[in-house]
Structures are given as structure tokens and as C-alpha cells.
Image (cartoon, rainbow, N blue to C red):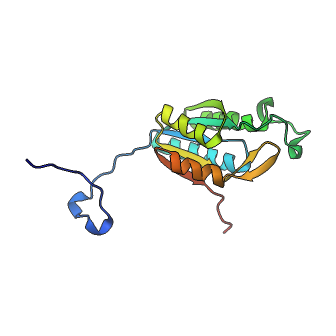
Amino acid sequence: MEINVSREKSAEWMTMDEITAVPQPVKKILLATDGSVSAIRATKFSIGLARKINAEILAVYVAGNEESFEIPKELEGQKFFGGVHPCEAGLAVAKAFGQENGVTVNTTILRGSIPRNIVKAAVADNVDLIVLGESGRSGLSRISLGTVAETVMRLAPCAVLIAREGKEK
């Protein structure tokens, strides 16, 4: 009795017979957004990618346990997109970009641990790719998203893409 075990191989062990057409595996993208500049960059990247590969997007905003819904001091007195909290405005902006580009964007707001809720949403909605910005906002101060991104990458059941700012040319 022969057991056929299919294993992935590193490049040096592959044969030309194993080079075949590759199916497009991304049908659903989870976009984690907090409305920050970095998150808007991730939003634009996600929308562009989704339009190109005919995928849909689940835009998620996770309010951390400690997060208040106070307006950050740097934004006091400004008018906000859709008249909502700046972080939640990220969802409205994602939806608007989706409509403008013919991409289906569903939105949800969750509470609790940011990385764990991003991963839970990805599992629950069976997403193929998670997209995050490289830095975000938390409460009244901006923080590096490094810890969130690292945790999401470690826990995620799918690919994770970090949308970084491009270098000046």
C-alpha cells in the first residue's frame, strides 16, 4: 500500500512538473482600521487589491478595553467624516472607498483585545488575508502598531499584510 503524502518543497527540490497555474486564493480581505493615516493607507491598498482580484472586504474597528471615545486633542474642533468619532470614521471611509471603486465592504465594530478580536473576526468570517497599517491610534495618543501586528501575524490562520508608507523617490 502506497501512501501519497503531499508536502511543500523548497525551491531547490522542486521539479518543472511542479510549476503549475496558481489559483487566486484571496476572496475575502479583513481590513483592520482605526482611522489613522496608516490605516487609511491600508484601506486604499485593500480597496485597490480587492478591485483587481474581485475580492470583498470586511473592515473592522476594535475598540480596546481601555480605550475611551474621547476626541484626541490634535483633532479637537475639527469636523469629522460622517460626523462620527475619528476611529469609527475609518469604517465610513473604507465603505466610501469601496462604493467609489465597486468593491463590497462590510463593516463591524468590536470591543476588547485588538489583536485577538482581529483574528477572531478573520476566523469567523473565513478571510484569506488580513491587512493592517504599520502604526495606529489608541485613546488619546498614537502608538506603534508593531505589537498588534506581531500578535496578529502570530495568531492569524491566514496571510497578514502590513501596508507601509512608501519611500520618497
In the image, taking residue 78 as reference, residue 12 lies left or right, namely left
| Up-down relation of residue 169 to residue 65 (above or below) | below
In the image, taking residue 109 as reference, residue 23 lies left or right, namely left
**41 and 108: which is toward the camera:** 108
Q: In the image, residue 26 lies at what x, y percent?
A: 44, 43
Q: Who's the residue at 82% across and 36% down the image?
A: 80
In the image, taking residue 155 as reference, residue 25 lies left or right, namely left
Give the residue furthest to the left: 1
Q: Who's the residue at 77% across and 38% down the image?
A: 67
**54 and 160: which is toward the camera:** 160
| Up-down relation of residue 162 to residue 12 (above or below) | above
Dividing the picture into quadrants, the one containing residue 87 is top right
Q: How many marks?
A: 0
Residue 52 visible in image: yes
Q: Who's the residue at 58% across and 42% down the image?
A: 47
**137 and 78: which is toward the camera:** 137
Q: Who's the residue at 70% across and 41% down the image?
A: 34
Residue 45 visible in image: no
| Up-down relation of residue 104 to residue 140 (above or below) | above
Quadrant placement of the C terminus: bottom right
